Image (cartoon, grey):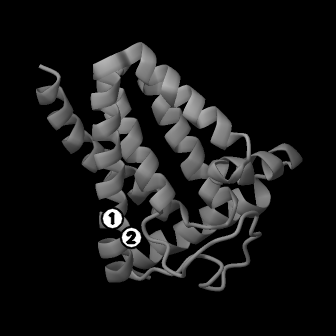
């Protein structure tokens, strides 16, 4: 067994531990909601209200951060979805025959990297750069969404780790632009 085979075996083992063994009724309800927060009705009222409050209180700086946040998440998502997923073509666990419990619907066959994790990593990087005191909260939210993707059976752990890393890299590059813009 080569090193890549050992890593793939470890990835599959950890997936099944998270998805099938390390579970609870609370997490069975919470993780699908977290992974698809944007599909909950109240989200479409709370998110615009929070965004409006942030822009009202933060004025020009908040708008600048929001623009860079959108550019970071958009470019990271595009790179992940249009370049890496077609190039790598790693199947999602359920498509690859892993005996996972699907707790949320999945779309598409390729799973590497996780776009949820990419977007959260990019967002956490930009927001952490703009608001350093909030960095632990931003990264905790990104980690929770990434974990939810594995818990729900949509991705292998390596998919979400790579997604967080890619998102963070793209986010930090955009955050460097933000810092120049805020001077």
Tell me if mark 2 has few (under 14), some (14-19) or many (20+) residues whose alpha carbon lies within 10 angstroms of its own. Answer: some
Give SS at disc 1.
helix
Secondary element at image label 2: helix
Q: Nearer the viewer, residue 123 or 157?
A: 123
Q: Quadrant of the C terminus?
A: top left
| Horizontal arrangement in the rendering, residue 51 relative to residue 151 (left or right) | left
Residue visible at 30% across and 47% down in the picture: 72
The N terminus, quarter of image: bottom left
Q: Which residue is mark 1?
A: 78
Counting from the top left corner in percent of width and height, residue 78 is at 33, 64
State the residue at coordinates (46%, 61%): 115
Q: Are marks 1 and 2 in contact (CB under 8 Å)?
A: yes
Q: Residue furthest right?
A: 25
- Which residue bears the numbered disc 2? 81
| Residue drawn at (35%, 35%) of the image | 66
Q: Is residue 47 above or below residue 76?
A: above
Q: Position of residue 7 (x, y in %)?
A: 45, 69
């Amino acid at each position: 067994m080569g090193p890549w085979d050992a890593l793939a075996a470890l990835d599959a083992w950890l997936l099944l531990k998270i998805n099938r063994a390390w579970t609870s009724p609370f997490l069975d309800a919470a993780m699908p909601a977290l992974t698809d927060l944007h599909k909950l009705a109240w989200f479409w009222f709370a998110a615009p209200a929070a965004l409006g409050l942030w822009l009202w209180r933060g004025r020009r700086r908040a708008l600048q951060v929001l623009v860079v946040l959108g550019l970071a998440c958009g470019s990271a998502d595009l790179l992940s979805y249009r370049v890496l997923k077609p190039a790598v073509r790693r199947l999602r666990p359920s498509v690859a025959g892993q005996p996972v419990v699907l707790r949320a619907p999945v779309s598409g066959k390729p799973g590497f990297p996780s776009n949820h994790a990419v977007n959260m990593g990019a967002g956490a990087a930009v927001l952490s750069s703009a608001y350093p005191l909030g960095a632990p909260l931003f990264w905790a939210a990104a980690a929770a969404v990434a974990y939810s993707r594995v818990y729900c059976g949509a991705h292998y752990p390596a998919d979400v780790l790579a997604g967080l890393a890619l998102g963070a890299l793209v986010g930090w590059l955009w955050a460097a632009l933000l810092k120049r813009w805020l001077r």
